[in-house]
Image (cartoon, coloured by chain):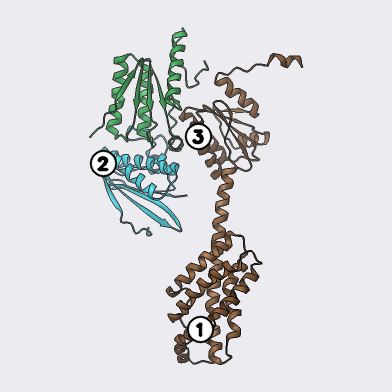
Amino acid sequence: MNGSPDAPRPLDITASAGVVQARQLARALAQECRFSLVEQTKLITAASELARNTLIHGGGGTMTARLVEERGRRGVRLVFSDDGPGITDVELALTDGWTSGGGMGLGLSGSRRLVDDFVLDTTPGRGTAVTVTKWAR
Amino acid sequence: MVREGPSGLLKKDVLVAGAGVSDRLVELLSVQGEDLGANWADKVTGRLGGRVSRAEVKQELQEIYTALVAALGSGSLDGHGDAYGEVRALLTELSRNRARQGFTPTETAVSVFALKEVLEPALSGDGGDLAAYLKFAALLDTLGLFTIEVYAATREELVAAQAEQLLELSTPVVKLWDGVIGVPLVGTLDSARTMVVMEKMLQALIDTGSEHAIIDITGVPAVDTEVAQHLLKTVVAARLMGAECTISGIRPQIAQTVVALGINFGDIATKATLADALRHALRRSGVTLSAAPQASAR
Amino acid sequence: MSERVPVLQIGQVLLVSIQIDLDDQSVLALQDDLAAKVVESGAHGVVIDITALDIVDSFVGRMLATVASLSRLLDAQTVVVGMRPAVAITLVELGLSLGGVRTALTLEKGLQVLERAHVSSLGASGPAGAIPDTAAGR
């Protein structure tokens, strides 16, 4: 997890304005990283979905966003973390159409398809951290 | 970085020689600077077969010569070191130009290696000169290899750029009728190419205001699951934008693969030929086709 | 700090053009406004212009689908116009196909779709309006 000199910029997601800010931050980094329009759109959409998850299911949390560089590739890494109830059945949560919050059940499974790397780290009762990375092509 | 030395020399001699060697080299290079430069330019021009003018070569080498003498003047013989930054910058420019103009790696590196031959006659023949020359040769080897590295990197960039151009070339989007665009795909489809086609076609729908697109895969030898998925996604994306897609030219082998792979084309319109697909698209957009009266008179 | 998106009425059609990045409350407010306005105006069509949106996530996608279903119940057709290619590609990847939502490339084509749907619903004697996406020719 090394590689970027940029100091991570944590963002509070405690209200729906935080979801909007998460999108804006993701957009700014995607542009800085010279993503194509489609890659940019995918990253922002994933940020929006995951930020809303953090807000609704995690009871609020933070997003930390930064540029990363690994093996000659440049990309954007977003970490969403909360101290919420966590996810008991990870398999199930990553299934299309499964929802616990009255949404469309595409938040986790859908955003996983929009990024290149997706790591879900959750402990029931302790919280959830989702780390996603998208590389510039 | 003065490590190596002929076995006959004691270690302390080598250390002392560090500064002495570069001084002697500066002297050798400077004393007959003019002759040496001309000689060097002649040798290099000869090896390039006249494809670069002598004046141009001389100009390039003059700059390198000046930078090299300055670097030697600092007492360093390490081609990778800071002292040689300017020399490397000039060599980078030279190597990139040679690579772009289609010269071989040898023709590129010769600009550096020729200096060895040029300097040889100037040596006095005593042991000190020999030691200096050997060190200088090692330095030139480093710099020569550096030009080859830059050369290779430049060629790789060229190849990558060409691959991208080929991708652009191989995915034309054509207007078939008012409101109908066609994407004739020829050759092997991989994910990257299918994605480029997808984006290009969707953009063309907007640019031309077309509500129908026909993806013709007559020229595609095989379709795998991933490519089929990309095609399906393209069709769904077009629908989301308010346009219809038809896939035409599905050859029997491909139809078999699609069925065998269990790929479901769902309610997507597929037609055997481009003509059928066009007729379908026109009918959907409300254009009526009828045989012209004079056609029956034939 | 919810933003209110204006709902315009042109004849029998309601027009909404989303110009800014809306937060979730504003999206829900728009949904409510539209439902109320359809009833109040008796409009037969709703056009939602998303040309300016650079992303549509599942929340906005759900709003679009809900408005389409709601308006159908209230005897009006909804057409979403101006979706950008990158947005469409992303929605497909996300797994959102917006089933039941009619779409058109441009505002003008969207209005034509509504016009045709309206004419055919007046002309048909049967239960009109329940035609699926197949935009039955003319």
Mark linked to residue B25: 1
Q: Which mark is residue B5?
A: none
Q: Mark 1 packing: few (<14 Cα in 10 Å), some, or many (20+)?
A: many
Label 1 vs label 3, nearer the camera: 1
**Cα–Cα gap, marks 2 and 3:** 39 Å
Q: Residue at left 27%, top 37%?
A: A16
* Mark 2 element type: loop
- Say what secondary structure mark 3 lies in: helix
Reading the image, the residue beneath label 3 is B202
Horizontal placement of B168 versus C13: left or right? right
Q: Are there few (<14), some (14-19), or many (20+) residues within 10 Å of tag 3? A: many
In this picture, is B144 found above or below C119? below
> Three-letter amino acid code at disc 1?
Leu
Q: Chain of mark 3?
A: B
Where the C terminus of chain B falls, by quadrant? Answer: top right
The residue where tag 2 is placed is A59
> Same chain, marks 2 and 1?
no
Q: Residue A120: where, in percent of width, then height?
A: 37, 48
Disc 2 or disc 1, which is closer to the eye? 1
* Chain that is coloured cyan in the picture: A
Q: For marks 2 and 1, give the CA distance.
A: 73 Å
* Residue B148 x/y as whole percent: 56, 67
Specify the quadrant of the image occupied by residue B97.
bottom right
Give the letter of the brown chain. Answer: B
Give how far across and how far down residue C70 sits, in percent. 35, 20
Colour of the chain lettered C: green
